[in-house]
Amino acid sequence: MPISECAKKPAAGARKEDIPFIKCQVCEKLAVQLHQQVEKKRAEIAPKKISEYQIIEISENVCNLKKQEADWILQIDIVEKGDKLELVDQGSEGQCNSECKTIERACQEVLGYSDTDVAEYLYTSKPDLGSLVNYLCKDLTKACSTKPPPVPKNRIPGEAFVAKSEKEAEMEKMMKSMEGMPGAPGMKMYSRDDLMNMNNFGGDDGDDEDDDDDETRLPSNLGKIMREKESAKNDLKQKITTGIAKTRETLKKHANKVSNWVRQTWRGLKNPASKKSTKGNKAEL
């Protein structure tokens, strides 16, 4: 087999030349996502109040395709209409090629080092969507301060939007959610295609059945592991709490002993002097 057929297909990169044409639209969609995700987080943790750190975490991840907060980028297609480029929401996630990377790059350029500024604004002002769009896209970043230039007539069209299957989307979400878990770094060794083809590895029906069983057991096993982990955490917490209580009780007893010893010693020192004084008085009489 020729080496060219074995070589992996190079990853598509961002088309930087397209960014000026979509920068304002990306900023507006970014504002929508920030507003929605902060409100969603606020609802999830209610009645607790959302912290500024939690909002900063959202703003730091919302333009990073490796994070779940940036999944919105996967649903957008760049469509050429006349001398303009329009961002069209497809309603489902698509394969991430050059257009996806271009939107990610535009998002990163818009937000830049302003992620903490917009997070502070969201935390302190609790703005509505319109106010956030104006603040982010006109005041803070100037992304929408001028109209985008016309698209050159000789621009090479981008690739067509190709929707992911539900299985692909679910697998990628699972991999993102597993990031940082023990053993998860090893998952980076496999490409998306490798992971999708694992069920057919070996080509035997028996293996397929085993894989189906593994898929069936995965959620329960994962849940069991998480429960055991939580149980161990609770046990450790209980041990620490019990240890602190025992230590406090021991120190209290020790303090009482020391206090009693000091009190008795003081009385012992005081009483002989008192007796000596009494004997002296009797002698004088």
Image: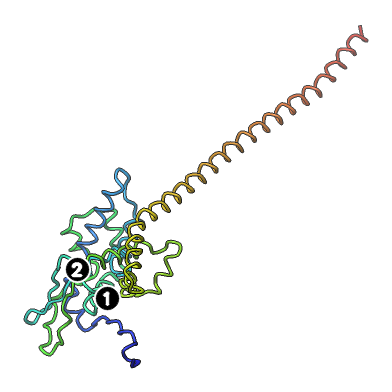
Badge 1, how many Cα within 10 Å: few under 14, some, many 20+? many
Left or right of 26 in this view: 245 = right
Residue at (14, 72) in percent of width and height: 87
Residue at image x 18%, y 74%? 162
98 or 186, which is in the foreground? Answer: 186
Residue 138 against residue 45 in the figure, above or below: below
Relative to 241, is 70 above or below? Answer: below
Q: Which mark is residue 105?
A: 1
Q: Do the residues bearing badges 1 and 2 touch, measured as CB atoms within 8 Å?
A: no
Circle 1: element type: helix
Crowd around label 2: few <14 · some 14–19 · many ≥20 (10 Å): many
**Residue wearing tag 2:** 75
User: Mark on residue 32?
Assistant: none
Q: How is the image coloured?
A: rainbow
Residue that extends furthest to the right in the rendered view of this protein:
283
As drawn, is 38 to the left or to the right of 84? right
Residue 36 position within the rendered picture, expressed as x and y whole percent measured from the top left: 22, 57
In the rendered image, which quarter is residue 96 located in? bottom left
Q: Label 2 is placed on what type of residue?
A: Gln
Front-lying residue, 217 or 85: 217
Q: Nearer the viewer, residue 12 or 105?
A: 12
> Does label 1 or label 2 sit earlier along the sequence?
2
The kind of residue tagged 1 is Arg
* Quadrant placement of the C terminus: top right
Which element type, helix, strand or loop, lies under badge 2?
helix
Foreground label between 1 and 2:
2
Q: Is residue 183 above or below residue 260?
A: below
x, y percent for residue 160 = 15, 79
Q: Quadrant of residue 154?
A: bottom left
Q: Where does the image place residue 172, in percent across and percent down from the top left? A: 30, 67
